[in-house]
Image (spheres, helix red, strand yellow):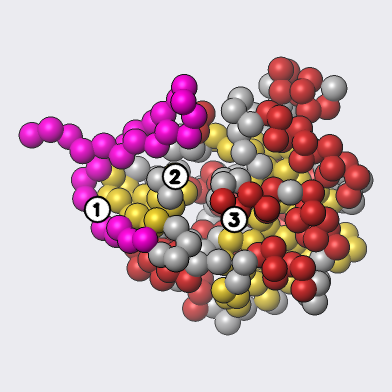
Amino acid sequence: MSSVWFTEELHPYYRKALRVKAILEDEQTPYQHIQVLDTEFFGKTLILDDIIQLTERDNAGYHEMITHIPMLAQGSPRRVLIVGGGDGGSLQQVLKHSSVEEAVVCELDRRVVEVSRKHFTQFGDPWSDPRARLVIQDAFTYMEGGREKFDVIISDTTDPIGMAERLFSEEFYRLMSAALNPGGAIATQCEQPFFDTALIREIYSFARTLTRHPAYYYAHIPTYPGGGIGFMYLSDTPWQEGLNRDYPQGLNYLNREVHQAAFALPEFFRRELYG
């Protein structure tokens, strides 16, 4: 019997594949193609528009790093905004902080929330937490409203394709910065150093105009292109402040040593980014 593989090709010179045991969901919403596959080794896998978003096996590297780095730097965030994040993984991590009074998730596609809530039960249904508030809306439009302020903003977006492309623009970063309370911190999904150097350099260049301590950091996630993903940190508070805090319980990826090492960049990329 021949094997069934899901193959992701983001670049004409690079692809990756997971062996598929079963197709659990496959639907086209008004916004995107949603699939949930049961794969060997990596378990249930969420795929949007043919791009892997998370797997049961390795999602902790992404969700813990994008959330706790800014949360720990801020120290005691009360109001948190998650841009995207309809799978619930970032929300689960945010709610580990007892200081949080409200976590707003601004997700474009309600079906992402519904499908993920059904299949990714390891996130413990954070949507049932009274501190969680779901807003179904385009994040750019939501941020343009400018009505709310946050202590931490986490931009847990898909890749800069289609509608999500605006969420990597200087204008959106300015909107996020304007919505940040004094002493607050932002972390964004910021692509991969080998494949997306020019985009990251561009984002870092305008991040420097918005905040005193921007920095790029990195996490190891095998099912993402190149085996990892990067994040942009923006704050007037140095990221190192987070090293002095108490870490939440029950983490599977982040610890103090990983936290420190995540900001150490390969020399070729450090030259490109920092000059």
Circle 3: residue type? Met
Q: Is residue 71 magenta?
A: no
Circle 1: residue type? Ile
Q: Magenta segment, which residues? A: 1-28
Q: Left or right: where does residue 198 sit relative to residue 25? A: right
Q: Position of residue 189 (x, y in %)?
A: 64, 47
Q: Position of residue 95 (x, y in %)?
A: 60, 67
Q: Position of residue 82 (x, y in %)?
A: 64, 63
Please state which of residues 201 and 215 is positioned toward the viewer in this rendering.
201
Q: Left or right: where does residue 91 sit relative to residue 100? A: left
- Disc nearer the start of the sequence (2/1): 1
Residue placed under numbered mark 1 in the picture: 23
Residue placed under numbered mark 3 in the picture: 163
Main SS, magenta region, reads strand
Cα gap from disc 2 to disc 1, whole angstroms: 15 Å
Task: Give the residue drawn at x 85%, y 22%.
Answer: 275
